[in-house]
Image (spheres, rainbow, N blue to C red):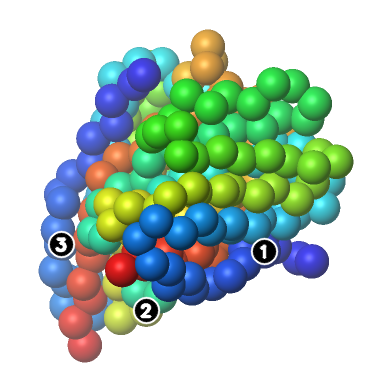
Amino acid sequence: GIQVEQSPPDLILQEGANSTLRCNFSDSVNNLQWFHQNPWGQLINLFYIPSGTKQNGRLSATTVATERYSLLYISSSQTTDSGVYFCAARTGYNFNKFYFGSGTKLNVKP
Amino acid sequence: GAGVSQSPSNKVTEKGKDVELRCDPISGHTALYWYRQSLGQGLEFLIYFQGNSAPDKSGLPSDRFSAERTGGSVSTLTIQRTQQEDSAVYLCASSLVGGAGSPLHFGNGTRLTVT
């Protein structure tokens, strides 16, 4: 399977700051998603973004498939953004598995 | 329902007992996944169902684990003779189809504690 690496592993922000989370993957993918796991353990789908750029409010994501990475931008962070952010990737030759990174743990302080 | 539903939300069991975890996917979603998340860790793939095709069981950690999906909808994950290392959150996800363009939607998980 493919390797999915996320950085940084931990991030502490002051409320209002901006941040960029990175996801590198070792092979070409046809499905790339970003998830937020809140402190209660719920996994929320943020973006389905195998390529290109998408924006949703204060969040945006960019995937450069040819260079095998994706970025998640959080602007004007809020305490409710705290939690763990996962990216998950799937290749075009194995539809069965999404490979997850080990996550970026974000703590936004008031 | 509107989302993926899992039950029970919490399960405490004694070592050696069998447990059944249930997942009800979003209506119309043909692809269903089970993942496991140990404390503070990432997600580990367990099994994948797609329509009437044979499931991909390659992630099941031992023969004590099994899963079925009846009528292409509800799925049950069964763990026999539970061990303490089985303690984790078991997450179910579904998607519209198994192909490239389908986002995953997760349930809230079942937190299993084996004492």
Q: Chain of mark 2?
A: A
Q: How many angstroms separate mark 1 from mark 3 (CA)?
A: 31 Å
For the residues beneath circles 2 and 1, the answer to whether they share a chain is no
From where the camera sits, is residue A16 visible? yes
Q: Position of residue A57 (x, y in %)?
A: 50, 65
SS under mark 3 = strand
The answer to whether residue A58 is above or below residue B37 is below
Hey, what amino acid is under mark 3?
A: Leu
**Which residue is label 1 attached to?**
B5
**Which residue is label 2 attached to?**
A80
Residues A64 and B100: in front is B100
Say which label, 2 or 3, has the lower sequence index.
3
For the residues beneath circles 1 and 3, the answer to whether they share a chain is no
Q: Position of residue B99 (x, y in %)?
A: 66, 25
The answer to whether residue A11 is above or below residue B102 is below
From where the camera sits, is residue A22 visible? no
What residue is shown at x 39% (from left), y 56% (from top)?
B16
SS under mark 1 = strand
Hey, what amino acid is under mark 2?
A: Thr
**Which residue is label 3 attached to?**
A11
